[in-house]
Image (tube, rainbow, N blue to C red):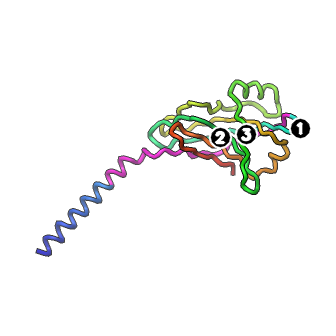
């Protein structure tokens, strides 16, 4: 009797483990994540107390489902960890700024804009630009920039300058 209980109990446990493994395997691409890295950071003054930041970055959608962008914000983080949010510049205005400010160089990538849909398993090179109401020299003293991408469902993914 004990041998039968042990044998069938062992078979039951193996069956449950196999079912859990199948469920985990099927769900492997269902978790939305948008890791990324900075490619290039450019700053320029827009007067005595204002500056512009243009960041080229690479973002990868590691899930099997599209990620739809609700909002994108650039933060300047100081040495104490305090964050200052920049005012994101619309794509048509970014094109004009690059034409008017040769110090920024050329615009390499398309801007990441609202309602962009990053397909599942895709990697995109994009850029975002923002103005900050502080002098450019103060931006140079930052600890890092952070690009925060808010997905349509409300989750926020951060790409951090290294």
Give the residue displayed 36% in from the left and 52% down from the top: 24
Give the residue displayed 67% in from the left and 35% down from the top: 127
The mark nearer the N terminus, 1 or 3, is 1
Q: Residues within 10 Å of mark 1 (few under 14, many from 20)?
A: few
Give the residue displayed 31% in from the left and 51% down from the top: 22
* Label 3 secondary element: loop
Residue 23 counted in the magenta span: yes
Q: Residues within 10 Å of mark 3 (few under 14, many from 20)?
A: some
| Horizontal side, residue 83 vs residue 44: left or right | left
Q: Are marks 2 and 3 in contact (CB under 8 Å)?
A: no
Identify the residue position indicated by label 3 in the image: 86
Where residue 112 appears, as percent x and y from the top left, is 62, 33
Q: Residue furthest right?
A: 48
Identify the residue position indicated by label 2 in the image: 57
Residue 42 counted in the magenta span: yes
Dividing the image into 4 quarters, which one contains the N terminus?
bottom left
**Cα–Cα gap, marks 1 and 3:** 16 Å
Identify the residue position indicated by label 1 in the image: 48
* Label 2 secondary element: strand
Residue range of the region highlighted in magenta in the rendering: 21-46
The mark nearer the N terminus, 2 or 3, is 2
């Amino acid at each position: 009797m004990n041998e039968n209980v042990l044998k069938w109990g062992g078979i039951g446990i193996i069956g449950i483990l196999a079912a859990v493994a199948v469920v985990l395997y099927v769900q492997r691409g269902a978790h939305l994540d948008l890791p990324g890295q900075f490619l290039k950071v450019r700053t320029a003054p827009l007067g005595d107390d204002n500056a512009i930041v243009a960041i080229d970055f690479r973002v990868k959608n590691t899930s099997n489902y599209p990620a739809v962008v609700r909002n994108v914000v650039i933060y300047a983080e100081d040495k104490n960890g305090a964050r200052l949010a920049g005012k994101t510049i619309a794509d048509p205005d970014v094109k004009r700024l690059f034409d008017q400010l040769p110090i920024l160089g050329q615009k390499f990538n398309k801007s990441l804009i609202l309602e962009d849909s990053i397909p599942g398993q895709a990697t995109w090179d994009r850029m975002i630009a923002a103005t900050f109401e502080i002098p450019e020299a103060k931006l140079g003293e930052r600890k890092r920039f952070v690009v925060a991408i808010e997905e349509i469902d409300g989750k926020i993914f951060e790409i951090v300058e290294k």
